[in-house]
Image (tube, rainbow, N blue to C red):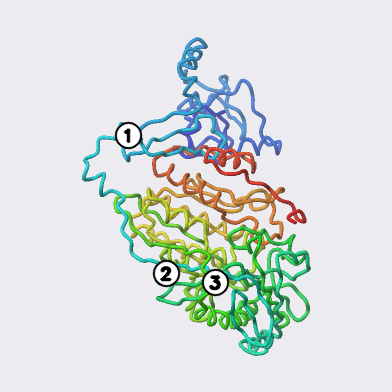
């Protein structure tokens, strides 16, 4: 594959290799040369052998061939009319230069125009290209008029949301639904009413699982959902109560016992099949209310089948929500969420690509109750077009996840109400978070392109300085993912991509703008490991992505990724940012 003139500028020191057979008399240009980024794979496949006599790209551009040369052949002096002689530094000059900058070879810093010190980690060329920004200390402030300094980034609160986390110490099944003294009691007979809410749901069963009871078999995990309810205002503002210490877990099979799943399923021992503590999962000390649904035969791979299970479970949760509205229990903590604008700061958005490929791939957007189902619209029914929400709406449970994709990369309902990238971007006083855009991933390529173009128009109209794009799953939806990155990139908007790729999910498509990428994988082999919530956005992933976006907006070069996934790269960047190491897991080792 030949290279562009722009790509050529980044590879002048790389070997010059013809991409195709070239004839005598050709004046060599970028279009005649193979992409150096492919050399490693070509060598492994036995398609290319480099020669010590081969010239560099900068030495052959503009030269004329004296004879025909075959494809994937190193260009040597004997086939050219001339060689561009590039002045090389002498050994003495190099030694002298190294001596002068040795102390600065690890860290170089400068004071930037935005009042930050920009620190470059010079020995991190194989990392994700990180540079750090830290505030300038007294006496080092840039020469900016005082009135500009005071107003730039000034915080303006648009909406306030208070999430009151109410302590729940136990859950029991009984003859009436109530909350008293921190104990939730659920009417055992409620399943008889709940199952009638959708004809495709054939039976429901409730089970309470305490933290010390998790080494038990369950069917595949379809979702983890908090118990939260509005007590004042609408989604994104006012007051919401959240039951602390308890979550619902939906599991499901059809009448033939077929797991309700698509690419991989998570049936098995619960303590081995959920990554406890990750954003979408139950926490270490949470009580789990398991709602097990049996849906109609052969409906598991259709949209209505899984939705029926979610809809019937939501009926049960709503009865608890109604009790929680009136319950004045112990408030473990109050979470204050603000939608803010910071005029003068870089305008950024977070784009969440969500599943929308039909079948079981869907999500409910903006229900009446936090994390609920009723009153919401499915993104597939909306044509998968981009929909922008405020950060507070996301943090208040505006997304209910219906998707039954591979468990490890699935962002469950609980993930969205505490999405680390939303939390991180909203809290960053150096950025102006404009909103969070949700865009579905259609199945048909023409629809993917159409939806992505609509996203591009939205990004342009928002006058943005940077975007972060995430996607759950991999493979088919990576096509949209790369399209979205291209829509931002071709408009000159710095863009960072966040996805599971590793070994199994390696990108099958790409473009020239997909140069700043952050990996989510936490599986030792780099695979979808069927552990629910394992390889999704975590706080560490979010921190790396936000810093990389700042680097991109500052014009910092992002070093090329290694050819193969390497967790050492991630841990090196974690260390730079003061984050813990990413510890990889294997199936069956979590407990």
- Horizontal and vertical percent position of residue 503: 67, 48
Sequence-wise, which precedes: disc 1 or disc 3? 1
Q: Could you tell me if residue 165 is visible in this image?
A: yes
- Kindly identify which residue carries mark 2: 236
- Horizontal and vertical percent position of residue 551: 44, 42
Sequence-wise, which precedes: disc 1 or disc 2? 1
**Which corner quadrant of the image does residue 427 belong to?**
bottom left
**Which corner quadrant of the image does residue 215 belong to?**
bottom right
- Kindly identify which residue carries mark 1: 138
**Which corner quadrant of the image does residue 444 belong to?**
bottom right
- Kindly identify which residue carries mark 3: 400
Foreground: disc 3 or disc 2: 2
Q: Which mark is residue 102?
A: none
Find numbered disc 3 in the image and state the secondary structure of the residue it sits on.
Answer: strand
User: Seen in the image, is 15 located left or right of residue 429?
Assistant: right
Gap between marks 3 and 2 measured at Cα = 15 Å
Label 3 crowd (10 A; few <14 / some 14-19 / many >=20): many
């Amino acid at each position: 594959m030949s290279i562009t003139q722009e790509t050529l500028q980044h590879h002048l020191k790389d070997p010059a290799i013809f991409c195709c057979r070239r004839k005598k008399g050709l004046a060599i240009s970028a279009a005649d040369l193979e992409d150096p980024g492919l050399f490693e794979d070509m060598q492994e496949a036995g398609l290319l052998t480099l020669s010590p006599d081969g010239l560099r790209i900068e030495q052959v551009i503009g030269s004329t061939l004296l004879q025909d040369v075959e494809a994937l052949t190193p260009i040597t002096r004997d086939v050219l009319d001339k060689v561009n002689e590039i002045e090389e530094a002498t050994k003495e000059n190099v030694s002298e230069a190294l001596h002068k900058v040795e102390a600065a070879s690890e860290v170089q810093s400068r004071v930037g125009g935005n009042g930050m010190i920009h620190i470059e980690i010079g020995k991190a060329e194989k990392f994700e290209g990180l540079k750090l920004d830290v505030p300038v200390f007294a006496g080092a402030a840039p020469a900016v008029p005082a009135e500009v300094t005071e107003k730039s980034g000034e915080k303006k609160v648009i909406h306030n949301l208070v999430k009151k986390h109410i302590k729940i110490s136990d859950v029991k099944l009984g003859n009436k639904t109530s909350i008293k003294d921190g104990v939730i009691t659920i009417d055992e007979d409620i399943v008889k009413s709940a199952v009638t809410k959708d004809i495709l749901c054939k039976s429901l069963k409730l089970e309470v699982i305490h933290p010390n009871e998790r080494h038990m078999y369950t069917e595949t995990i379809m979702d983890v959902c908090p118990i939260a309810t509005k007590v004042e205002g609408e989604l994104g503002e006012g007051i919401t109560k959240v039951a602390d210490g308890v979550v619902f877990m939906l599991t499901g099979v059809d009448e033939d016992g077929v797991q309700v799943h698509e690419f991989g399923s998570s049936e098995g021992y619960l303590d081995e099949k959920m990554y406890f503590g990750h954003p979408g999962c139950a926490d270490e000390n949470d009580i789990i209310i398991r709602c097990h649904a049996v849906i109609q035969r052969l409906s598991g791979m259709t949209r209505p089948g899984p939705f029926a299970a979610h809809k019937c479970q939501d009926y049960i949760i709503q009865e608890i929500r109604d009790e929680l509205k009136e319950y004045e229990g112990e408030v473990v903590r109050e979470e204050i969420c603000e939608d803010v604008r910071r005029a003068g700061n870089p305008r950024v958005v977070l784009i969440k690509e969500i599943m929308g490929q039909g079948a079981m791939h869907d999500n409910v957007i903006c229900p009446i109750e936090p994390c609920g189902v009723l009153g919401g619209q499915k993104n597939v029914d909306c044509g998968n077009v981009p929909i922008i929400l405020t950060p507070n709406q996301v943090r208040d449970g505006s997304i209910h996840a219906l998707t039954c994709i591979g468990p490890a990369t699935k962002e469950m309902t609980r993930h969205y109400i505490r999405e680390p990238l939303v939390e991180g971007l909203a809290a960053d006083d150096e950025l102006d978070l404009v909103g969070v855009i949700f865009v579905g991933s259609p199945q048909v390529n023409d629809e993917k392109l159409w939806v992505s173009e609509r996203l591009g128009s939205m990004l342009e109209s928002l006058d943005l300085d940077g975007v972060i794009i995430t996607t759950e799953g991999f493979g088919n939806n990576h096509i949209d993912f790369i399209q979205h990155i291209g829509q931002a990139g071709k408009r000159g908007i710095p863009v960072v991509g966040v996805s599971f790729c590793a070994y199994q999910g390696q990108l099958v498509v790409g473009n020239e703008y997909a140069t700043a990428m952050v990996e989510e994988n936490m599986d030792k082999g780099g695979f979808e490991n069927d552990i629910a919530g394992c390889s999704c956005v975590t706080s560490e992933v979010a921190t790396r992505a936000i810093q990389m976006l700042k680097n991109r907006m500052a014009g910092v070069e992002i070093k090329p990724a290694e050819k193969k996934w390497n967790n050492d790269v991630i841990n090196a960047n974690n260390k730079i940012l003061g984050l813990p190491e990413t510890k990889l897991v294997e199936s069956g080792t979590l407990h």
